[in-house]
């Protein structure tokens, strides 16, 4: 029967048009990770971070519950088998003192247990292979000589000194820091090695590492390229003068040549990163380093060019000469698709767009963004914080230099799917509308301000009101301005923490009067006056306001009387 129905269906002669992948992009949609839950629609970058962490926290909590109760999850219903849905094997199986037990503890990331097993092996006279010892040192250095927090396990809340809670937001002082105790297990085990080898490169221990390197004849041993890269990165921390820093870098590079260790991309990037802290020498040796890199057939990464830009860029100056290096770099990189090869690759686009913004070079800004759109280069914009910096700078550049119609096209394209405008970005948009005399769009922008959660920023709302009230417009525009002013008033009335300023009150009254809304203007004025009385704790003035309103027979009198009784402590006479 099904076959008969199938053959009865006439074949369509219309061509099936499959849209190109680019046309599937919806600029009005929220980021993909929030589209499955209508309640998770972040309006600001802070909410984006909070919701993202909440989702990841839920996954980690579920994983922690599964791993903590493996007996409850013994049945495997998935076909084929999905390992990540089953409990992880985190229990120790080997209890006897042996090198196999030590390797088991290292594989399970049990730092304290692995160090204890290592000490027991040495006390029993059992030799531990150099390879296993290196694995143990790697584990200790990775977790700063402490046991890692199990994924999903409850953690104590980060607090500053004095018990105060750390404020939300990203600050330079909040970046990860490595803290090491003196005579820690990494140093102790390294000192117990029968032969000193390139095994001690601890994050944040550059001075002690370099001291061992020089004083103990470390360079006489054969080291691999990764060790040399770490040592080159540590040079600025162990030498004070610029000349001494470069001499030490050159010494390490010569040592690599003597040991026939071929440098890689990270080697030259480490040199350029160290040169950024060598002052006036950087501009001399950075081009030489880049030329040597290309002579060896090593293709530079985005981090390489980011270091070059940082060396030659002067943030205090502006003008064409300050962006010549960026122009040359973009000409060389035009149409190139990149993959991440260095952790600092994600800093290139943000740095380049900052140079365009400081130099007010719109054409160069478009070139940077066109490079972002090549292939999957957008993946190298970095995390949400770096992406916010990039798109914020790009949009601010557009607001300053581009025509308002083009600005609005970009605005609809990147907000909110790619970027959440901060209050300063909104102010820049308002200034762009004012410059091109498109103030009729201000009510629409006010709706976006509310949608993005910036309607509680008093300075931003006051600037919006001042632009609407500055001059008269057509009847239709004044009607839309009046409706917008009433909406703003309702927002202020619903938030006691937001206080009216004299200018805002004057602007709203002006807008309502221009739209011939005399009654609403009077009501807004009286309501605002009552709010001012509450803020100044003046119940007598509030009572006089109600009496004055009643004397004129205003329809807002009952509402004013109700608010006065609810918001003020009145004596018997005042009641």
Image (spheres, rainbow, N blue to C red):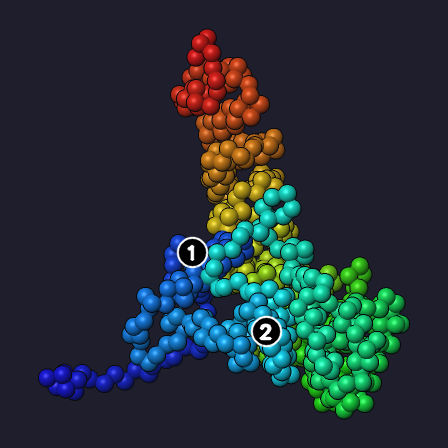
Q: Quadrant of the C terminus?
A: top left
Q: Within 10 angstroms of label 1, few (less than 14), some, or many (20 or more) residues?
A: some
Give me the disc on residue 244: none
- Quarter of the figure that contains the N terminus: bottom left
Q: Position of residue 434 (x, y in %)?
A: 62, 49
Q: Say which residue appears at 81% left-offset and 90% top-offset.
A: 258
Tell which of 422 and 434 is nearer to you: 422
Specify whether 277 is left or right of 484: right
Mark 2 vs mark 1, CA separation in Å? 52 Å
- As rendered, which of 44 and 353 lies closer to the eye? 44
Q: Which residue is mark 1?
A: 40
Res. 120 mark: 2
Note whether 60 is above or below 308 in the view shown. Answer: above
Residue drawn at x 55%, y 65% is 148
Residue 530 sits above or below residue 167 on the image: above
Left or right: where 109 falls relative to 400? left
Q: Earlier in the sequence, mark 2 or mark 1?
A: 1
In front of the other: 289 or 516: 289
> Horizontal placement of 83 versus 429: left or right?
left
Give the SS element for disc 1.
Answer: loop
Among the 4 quarters of the image, the one containing residue 405: bottom right
How far across and down, in percent of the image, does residue 335 sit?
A: 62, 80
Q: Is residue 553 left or right of residue 257?
A: left
Q: Residues within 10 Å of mark 2 (few under 14, many from 20)?
A: some
In terms of secondary structure, where does tag 2 sit? helix
Residue located at (80% from left, 85% from top)? 220
- Residue furthest left in the image: 1
Instruction: Please report the residue visible at 47 percent of the width from the left and 15 percent of the height from the top.
Output: 570
Q: Residue furthest top?
A: 573
Q: Name the spot of residue 70 as percent of width and height, x first.
A: 37, 67
Is residue 153 in view from this perspective? yes
């Amino acid at each position: 029967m099904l076959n008969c129905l199938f053959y009865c269906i006439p074949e369509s002669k219309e061509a099936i048009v499959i849209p190109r992948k680019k046309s599937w992009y919806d600029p009005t949609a929220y980021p993909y990770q929030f589209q499955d839950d209508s309640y998770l629609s972040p309006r600001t970058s802070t909410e984006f971070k909070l919701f993202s962490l909440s989702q990841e926290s839920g996954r980690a909590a579920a994983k922690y519950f599964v791993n903590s109760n493996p007996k409850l999850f013994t049945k495997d219903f998935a076909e084929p088998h999905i390992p990540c849905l089953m409990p992880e094997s985190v229990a120790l199986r080997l209890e006897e003192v042996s090198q196999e037990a030590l390797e088991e503890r290292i594989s399970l990331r049990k730092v304290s247990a692995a160090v204890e097993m290592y000490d027991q092996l040495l006390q029993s006279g059992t030799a531990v292979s150099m390879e296993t010892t290196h694995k143990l040192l790697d584990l200790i250095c990775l977790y700063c000589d402490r046991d890692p927090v199990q994924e999903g396990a409850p953690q104590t809340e980060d607090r500053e000194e004095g018990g105060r809670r750390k404020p939300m937001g990203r600050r330079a002082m909040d970046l990860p820091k490595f803290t090491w105790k003196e005579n820690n297990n990494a140093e102790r085990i390294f000192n117990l090695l029968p032969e000193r080898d390139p095994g001690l490169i601890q994050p944040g221990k550059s001075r002690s590492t370099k001291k061992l390197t020089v004083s103990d004849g470390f360079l006489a041993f054969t080291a691999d390229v990764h060790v040399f890269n770490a040592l080159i990165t540590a040079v600025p921390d162990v030498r004070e003068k610029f000349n001494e820093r470069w001499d030490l870098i050159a010494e390490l590079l010569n040592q690599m040549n003597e040991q026939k260790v071929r440098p890689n991309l990270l080697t030259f990037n480490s040199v350029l990163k160290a040169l950024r802290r060598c002052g006036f020498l950087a501009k001399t040796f950075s081009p030489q380093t880049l030329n040597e890199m290309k002579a060896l057939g090593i293709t530079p990464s985005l981090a390489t060019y980011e270091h070059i830009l940082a060396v030659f860029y002067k943030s205090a100056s502006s003008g064409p000469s300050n962006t010549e290096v960026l122009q040359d770099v973009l000409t060389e990189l035009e149409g190139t698709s990149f993959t991440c090869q260095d952790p600092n690759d994600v800093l290139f686009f943000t740095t380049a767009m900052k140079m365009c913004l400081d130099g007010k070079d719109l054409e160069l800004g478009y070139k940077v963004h066109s490079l972002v759109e090549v292939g999957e280069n957008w993946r190298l914009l970095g995390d949400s914080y770096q992406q916010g910096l990039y798109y914020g700078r790009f949009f601010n550049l557009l607001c300053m230099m581009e025509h308002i119609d083009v600005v609005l096209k970009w605005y609809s394209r990147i907000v909110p799917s790619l970027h959440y405008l901060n209050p300063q970005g909104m102010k820049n948009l308002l200034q762009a509308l004012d410059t091109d005399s498109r103030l009729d769009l201000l009510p629409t922008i006010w709706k976006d301000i509310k949608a993005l959660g910036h309607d509680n920023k008093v300075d931003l709302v006051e600037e919006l009101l001042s632009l609407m009230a500055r001059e008269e417009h057509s009847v239709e525009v004044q009607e839309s301005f009046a409706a917008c002013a009433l909406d703003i008033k309702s927002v202020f009335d619903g938030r006691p923490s937001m206080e009216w300023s004299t200018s805002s009150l004057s602007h709203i009254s002006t807008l309502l009067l221009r739209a011939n809304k005399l009654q609403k203007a009077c009501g807004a004025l009286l309501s605002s006056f009552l709010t001012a009385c509450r803020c100044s704790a003046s119940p007598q003035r509030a009572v006089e306001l109600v009496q004055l309103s009643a004397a004129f027979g205003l329809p807002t009198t009952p509402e004013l009387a109700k608010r006065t009784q609810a918001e003020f402590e009145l004596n018997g006479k005042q009641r």
